[in-house]
Image (spheres, rainbow, N blue to C red):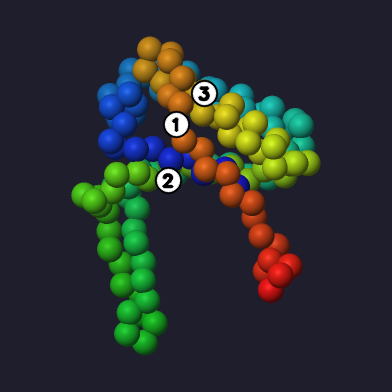
Amino acid sequence: MLLMQFSAQNTDFPSIDTWTPEEIQAHIGFMMDTNGKLAADGELVDGQGLAGPQQARIVRAGAGGAPVVTEGPFAETKEFLAGYWIVDCETPERAVEIAAHISTAPGPGGRPVNMPIEVHPIMSGPPQEM
C-alpha cells in the first residue's frame, strides 16, 4: 500500500486551494496517467484520493462500544493522508519505484511536489515467527 502524505508545515508545497486551475488539472492528469499505466501493467489493485482533514473524523469506542466521533478540522494536524494506492508488484523494489514516480507529481509552476509516499507491505497473516 502506497500512502500519499501532505504536510501543512511544508512551505515548498502550498495548500492545493492556492493552486491555479491549470496546476490542479496537471496534477490530477498526472495521477490519472499513472493509474492508467499501473492498470495496463496489471499492478493497480485500487487507488483513491481522499478528502482533506476538514472532512475527516476520528472514531473511538466509548462506553459499551458506542462510537465517539471527533470531527475535523484538527488544529494539531501537521500531516494528513491525501490518497492511497494498493499495488500488486513482483518485488518490494518495484513498489518503491512506483512511490518515487508518484512523488514527482507536478505542483505549482509545474515543479514536482516531491511529497512523501509511505510504502507498506500488506500482511496476509501474522509474521511467520509468531
Who comes first in sequence, dot 3 or dot 2? Answer: 2
Relative height, residue 123 to residue 111 (above, below):
below
Question: Mark 2 — residue?
Answer: 81
* Residue 86: numbered disc: none
Q: Are marks 1 and 3 in contact (CB under 8 Å)?
A: no
12 relative to 83 in the view: left or right: left
Q: Could you tell me if residue 27 is visible in this image?
A: no
* Alpha carbon separation for disc pair 3 and 2: 17 Å
Q: Amino acid at mark 1?
A: Met
Q: Amino acid at mark 2?
A: Leu
Q: Secondary structure at mark 2?
A: strand
Q: Residue drawn 42% across and 45% down?
A: 81
Question: Mark 3 — residue?
Answer: 104
Q: Picture quarter containing residue 123?
A: bottom right
81 relative to 128 in the view: left or right: left
Question: Mark 1 — residue?
Answer: 115
In the rendered image, the quadrant that contains the C terminus is: bottom right
Q: Picture quarter containing residue 102?
A: top right
Q: Secondary structure at mark 3?
A: loop
* Alpha carbon separation for disc pair 1 and 2: 11 Å
Residue 125 image offset from top left, x and y in percent: 69, 67
Who comes first in sequence, dot 1 or dot 3? Answer: 3
Q: Residue drawn 75% across and 41% down?
A: 91
- Furthest residue toward bottom: 64
Who comes first in sequence, dot 1 or dot 2? Answer: 2
Q: Secondary structure at mark 1?
A: loop
Residue 82 or residue 123, whichever sits in front: 123
- Furthest residue toward left: 75
